[in-house]
Amino acid sequence: MNNIVSLVTGAGGEIGHSLIEALAERGIPILATDLRPLPPPIARRCYRVIVGDITEPELHGQLLQIGFRRVFHLAAVLSSQAEREPEAAHRVNVEGTLRLLQTTHRMAKRHGEPISFLFPSSIAVYGIPSLDEKRRAGRVREEQYLTPMTIYGANKLYCELLGLYYARFYRRLAPEPEAGWIDFRALRFPGLLSAFTVPTGGTSDYAPEMLHAAAQGKPYHCFVRPDTRIPFMAMPDAVHAMLLLAEAPTSALRSHVYNVTAFSASAEEIATEARRLFPQAHITFEPDPRRQAIVDTWPEALDDSAAQRDWGWAATHDWERTFSEYLASNIRRRYQRAIT
Ligand code: SER
């Protein structure tokens, strides 16, 4: 995929930081957009940066002018934040995605060839009705429990369908098989753990927040119960999954949406690990009923066998490698540098 200009929306967010590093290392030219200016080290990795709102036509005019051949659409309002302002979340998460699908289709038509559109979806698309059912369900497959309780989950699920609709509708209309259409591919991510950034507005945020607070010796009040269990993945694996799926041949893909996961853990297990790695940690549990209710409907584990089968997905960071190798050393270094 070298030399293919890749558009990254929401470039200043959690996944954006790591994805841009990875694309830049592969020599891929990056056209980045975000609502706010990017931090200079990230901006330097991009060949063009546009600051603007993904829902505004002006931004799309600029994107069309510059041009791109692949899309990583990361811009979104995450689940807890979205519950606080559902209409605003819908505007960004759904209308922003719809506009970008339209822009991508125009771009694909102009080039007369398909453009891959990578869409990070989420465990939030699932909605399991009770804790008993959640424990019984175990590893959830892509077609199960698609009754999200949050606006964010509903937005993501709808955008998966919207992407599929665009892919099919415009492919049907394309004059020849290879003419411009959208090659839409979605990944349902579990909670993500990054050593370099802390997410904002998500509900799986308790895990990264706990670790980053522990490394700084700051007290942390975890907003879910100790027995809360959901799947997680280290950020390098999230980026690895996006790139692997982006590069998979269309003929290998039997679906347009895939679960990916690495391991599942309870909040208590993560707190124990945080205390082991950072003995100055001070973690207490003070569940917030609204945020607890959200994670209680998310699966405790994901079945990612379809991704393994179709495009050779396999997580490279298990629990041990995520914590002892990736998180411990990088988080330690990050805050040591901040202190000294
Ligand atoms: N990590 C996201 C959130 O908590 C889920 O995709 O909102």
Image (spheres, grey):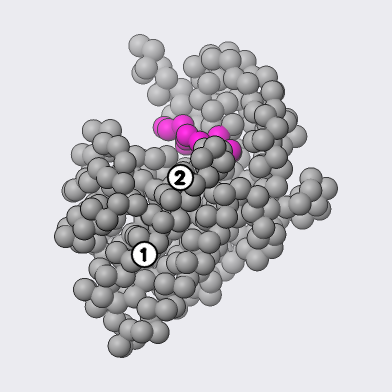
**Residue under the image location 39 percent in, 71 percent down:** 183
Magenta run includes residue 291 = no
Disc 1 element: helix
Can the viewer see residue 260? no
User: Percent position (x, y) of residue 61?
Assistant: 21, 58
Magenta run includes residue 199 = yes
Q: Which mark is residue 101?
A: 1
Q: Which residues are magenta?
A: 193-205
User: Percent position (x, y) of residue 208?
Assistant: 54, 32
The reply, left or right, for residue 173 in relation to residue 120 is left
Can the viewer see residue 109? yes
Q: Amino acid at mark 2?
A: Ala
Q: Looking at the image, which is closer to me, 114 or 35?
A: 35
Q: Amino acid at mark 1?
A: Leu
Q: Looking at the image, which is closer to me, 67 or 101?
A: 101
Of the numbered discs 1 and 2, the one sitting upstream in the chain is: 2
Above/below status of 188 relative to 221: below
**Residue under the image location 71 percent in, 43 percent down:** 296
Q: Which mark is residue 38?
A: none
How far is disc 1 from disc 2 in space, using C-alphas? 19 Å
Look at the image and tell me in which quarter the C terminus lies.
top left
**Residue under the image location 40 percent in, 24 percent down:** 334
